[in-house]
Amino acid sequence: MKDIVEQIVSDPRYLKNIEYGEPRSGHPEGKVKLHIAELEEILEKFTSRISEEQYWKLKFLIQVHDAFKAEATPNSPIESSNSHASLARKFASEFTDDTDLLNMIQFHDVNYALWKEYAATGSHDVERLSRLLDTIVDWDLFLIFLVIDGSSVGKDPEKLRWFIAEVRKRKRTMVDESWIV
């Protein structure tokens, strides 16, 4: 996985796309490359709690997950072919055939969508959560990634607490709210 990350960070499409972004809600850092740098710093705080394999998979997810916002249609649904997640998944599939990692890239913002719905209405789309629970295999890795992404400046840790609790009701995972930075 280390070799794959090295290939990704030298890819011209990646290098162009990480220059994209302006400060906005949830991303006061602006450019994607600054978001990636912040997530890499957060990842380093977890090195004593994760394996080397998890470290490189997380590094992969960090590099790719938002790298195609520049090419995405704004406000497109997560599952649509022109969302930043779908474009990132397509790019990542050129480097790996690990379906679980590709699904993590595709669905890395579903937790936020479910949280927004819950915060606004007091309930969430249970079927959408069930589909996500059935789609992701490695819940430890996925939740660690969501904690890393959700612990950056400008993000509300309450959504992580809520989502981790929802997952733990249905899946076994070592990740609990003590992982939140």
Image: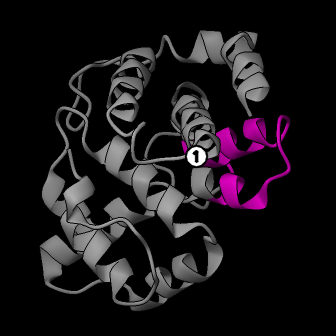
Locate residue 34, reporting x and y percent. Answer: 37, 16
Q: Residue at x 83, y 42 (%)?
A: 96
Q: Is residue 59 visible?
A: yes
Q: Is residue 77 visible?
A: no
Which residue occupies the extreme front position in the image? 48
The residue type indicated by label 1 comes to: Gln
141 sits to left or right of 34:
right
Locate residue 78, reporting x and y percent. Answer: 53, 57
Q: Nearer the viewer, residue 78 or 180?
A: 180
Q: Residue at x 21, y 77 (%)?
A: 118
Q: Nearer the viewer, residue 63 or 31?
A: 63
Vertical placement of residue 80 versus 7, above or below: below
Q: Residue at x 50, y 87 (%)?
A: 130
SS for callout 1: helix
Choose top left, top right, bottom left or bottom right for residue 111. bottom left
Reading the image, the residue beneath label 1 is 54
Vertical placement of residue 103 versus 139, above or below: above
Query: What segment is highlighted magenta in the picture?
Result: 81-103
